Amino acid sequence: MNRLTGFVFENKVAHGAFVELSEGVGEMLGRRAYSGDVRKLLGEAMAAMPLLATHLGYEGRINLQFQGEDAVKMLVAQVDHHLEVRAMAKAPEDLQGSFTGLLRGGVLALMLEPNAEHRESTQASVPIEGTSLAQALEAYFTQSEQLPTLIRLAADGDRLRGFLLQRMPLEDARGGEEDWEHVSILAATLKPEEMLQADLATLLGRLFAEEEVRVFEPRPVTVACRCSRAGISRLLLSLGREECDSILAEQGRIAVTCEFCGKEYAFTQFETAELFAAAGAVPSTTRH
């Protein structure tokens, strides 16, 4: 089961979340020829997205996006307020390297895109520093949000895990800075292999045996692309009958591959004609 589970310390010094993903990960990443290092980075990005959306207070989407020229050309991970996650990358099939090596020469940014018209989209840079995506996101929270945050990410094949611990406003807490430092030091001992082997209750018991922690009901997370045949059909209609007929004449069919999951949608000449007929288009005079 894919789920995001939040928790809070009873003294209100810190709150956090733990995400577990496995269902749908293979389908999302399996159609692309990613190298081991790129696939691991993508997996960590997917695990990070529900953590970033833990306290999303509006309907919309969060994008983690990288654009570069040297190694990875593009990486995008998304989550929305329904906790639907998807991710993709464009990179050479044999590309290997560390976190900073894969993302060298590019820009990593976090974008918030509310659905509501009265809310503006915002974008902030995520520093490509440290030895991992987790450390880069920690630096983002410290520099851009002024929220001391600890993040741990783990990816082993189709099993993805993420852990977040974040300080709460101390003026509303029953503890102080020393209490935050105590729990953050304990949390910093968490290793990726522990996250992959144990559930949240076990981890909290190991890390914070003497602390009072309240755990909330898990929220379901979906790993799935939003592409569909209906969406691709609308794309073809927007291209127009003449353009589609030109592609059919040259290739014998129209094939569109989703940029995210790599799924291919194919339309024959007959299916394309039916599509435009159903949309009320003027019949084509082109013969094949």
Image (cartoon, rainbow, N blue to C red):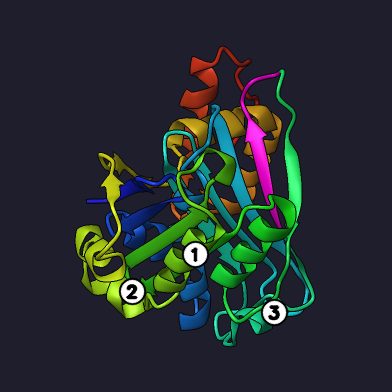
Q: Which residues are magenta?
A: 109-117
Which element carries disc 2, helix, strand or loop? Answer: loop
Q: Position of residue 143 (x, y in %)?
A: 73, 59
The amino acid pointed to by label 1 is Ile
Between marks 1 and 3 in the image, the one whose residue lies nearer the viewer:
1
Residue that badge 3 annotates: 71
**Which residue is pictured at 29% across the width and 76% down the height?**
194
Separation (CA) of disc 3 from disc 2: 22 Å
116 lies left or right of 172: right
Determine if residue 188 is in view.
Answer: yes
Q: For the residues labelled 1 and 3, say whether their Cβ atoms are less than 8 Å apart.
A: no
137 lies left or right of 124: left
Is the residue marked by circle 3 packed among few (<14), some (14-19), or many (20+) residues within 10 Å?
A: some
Looking at the rendered structure, which numbered label has been put on residue 222?
none
Between marks 2 and 1 in the image, the one whose residue lies nearer the viewer:
1
Separation (CA) of disc 1 from disc 3: 25 Å
Labels 3 and 2: the sequence-earlier one? 3
Which element carries disc 3, helix, strand or loop? Answer: loop
Q: Position of residue 139 (x, y in %)?
A: 67, 65
The amino acid pointed to by label 3 is Ala
The amino acid pointed to by label 2 is Gly
Q: Is residue 236 above or below residue 146?
A: above
**Which residue is pictured at 64% across the width and 68% down the height?**
136
Is the residue marked by circle 1 packed among few (<14), some (14-19), or many (20+) residues within 10 Å?
A: many
Residue that badge 1 annotates: 151
Residue that badge 2 annotates: 157
Q: Position of residue 52 (x, y in %)?
A: 52, 49
Q: Is residue 101 above or below residue 187?
A: below
In which quarter of the view is residue 195 placed?
A: bottom left
Q: Is 13 contained in the magenta span?
A: no
**Which residue is pictured at 68% across the width and 75% down the height?**
103
Which element carries disc 1, helix, strand or loop? Answer: strand
